[in-house]
Image (cartoon, grey):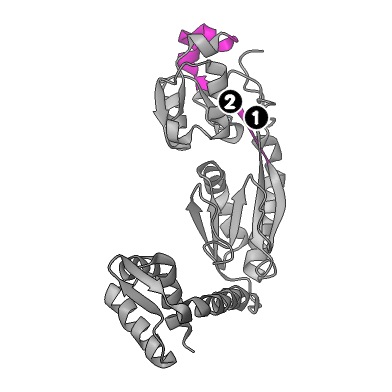
Amino acid sequence: MNWDDMRIFLAVARAGNLSAAARSLKVTQPTVGRRLRTLEETLAVRLFDRLPDGFAPTAAGQELIPLAEEMERTAEALHRRRASLADRVSGTVRLSVTEITAQFLSDHIASLRERLPDIEIEIAVSHRNANLSKREADLVLRECLPDQQGLIARKLGEFRYAVYGAADYVHRHPMALTEGRYQASDWVGYDEEHAYFTPQKWLNQKLGGRAAVVRVNNGIVLQNAVRNGAGLGVLPCFAGDKDSALVRVTPPLTEMTSTKHVIVHEDLRRVPSIRAVMDELIDLFKREAALLEGQSRARTSAA
């Protein structure tokens, strides 16, 4: 049985039509139709009723779906475990991270590559959890622990946040140095679509109904806007403390901590290249713990 044909069958069963199945598989619609006909000829059975509003599995098709899904799981497991047969620390390791974590990693990517010169690193920035079972990524760095079987998580460290402003802005707006900052100062924050971000949820409570005067959907843009005097903003300490144009106007916010974990599929944790990157990430977060937690140096301008 050709797995590619079964993969096409599953895609059509899930999508209900050829065009959507083709998009999900990144092939042409004629290819999907041709491979589906080949499968039906091989099995000598009609798998779908061609209806005006789409494709509906026949009784034979319904019976085939769980068998095809079992083949899919086996194919995915083989794809994952193929990498574990390698005995060299080389190849490509793909990381799925949020933008703040990506910003931190990009500051250290050169040293990581020096330690692992035969490994190529891909950093995919996304707020969606990559599917490790389908090898959408090799490692996921996230705050939430996984609730899916077969995944293993290891705590890396904690990101702490504080309020920052440009030195000139703080000088011109002395209320920024007091608790009155939440009503007296301009603020840069995230837009409504990203209101669920931990810093934005905290800021919304502090502002008490006021809206940030500048709203963005990207953490680096937020930091640039604060640096250029658009207002105060909540930034991760590793980014704000290293920026000489910024002044920290609060201590690290104890009520806002983001604990990061590295998550790997159990079939991949012993792959030499993936294991090596995991170990380097664990060491990196340990070395930079003081910076991440806002304890590396005192930049607070107000009690």
Q: What segment is highlighted magenta in the picture?
A: 158-179
Q: Which residue position holds label 1?
A: 256
Q: Which residue position holds label 2?
A: 202
Residue drawn at 66 percent across, 25 percent down: 253
Considering only vertical position in the picture, is 120 above or below 123? Answer: below
Residue 201 horizontal/vertical position (percent): 56, 28
Residue 115 horizontal/vertical position (percent): 63, 60
Q: To which quarter of the image does residue 11 belong?
A: bottom left
Residue flagged by tag 1: what amino acid is it? Met
Residue 144 horizontal/vertical position (percent): 64, 46
Which type of secondary structure does the marked residue at label 2 adopt?
helix
Does the stretch in magenta take in 163?
Answer: yes
Tell me if label 1 and label 2 are in contact, CB under 8 Å. yes
112 displayed left or right of 10:
right
84 displayed left or right of 10:
right
**Foreground residue among 57 and 216:** 57
Residue 22 visible in the snapshot? no
Residue drawn at 70 percent across, 52 percent down: 282
Considering only vertical position in the picture, is 211 above or below 150? Answer: above
Does the stretch in magenta take in 173?
Answer: yes
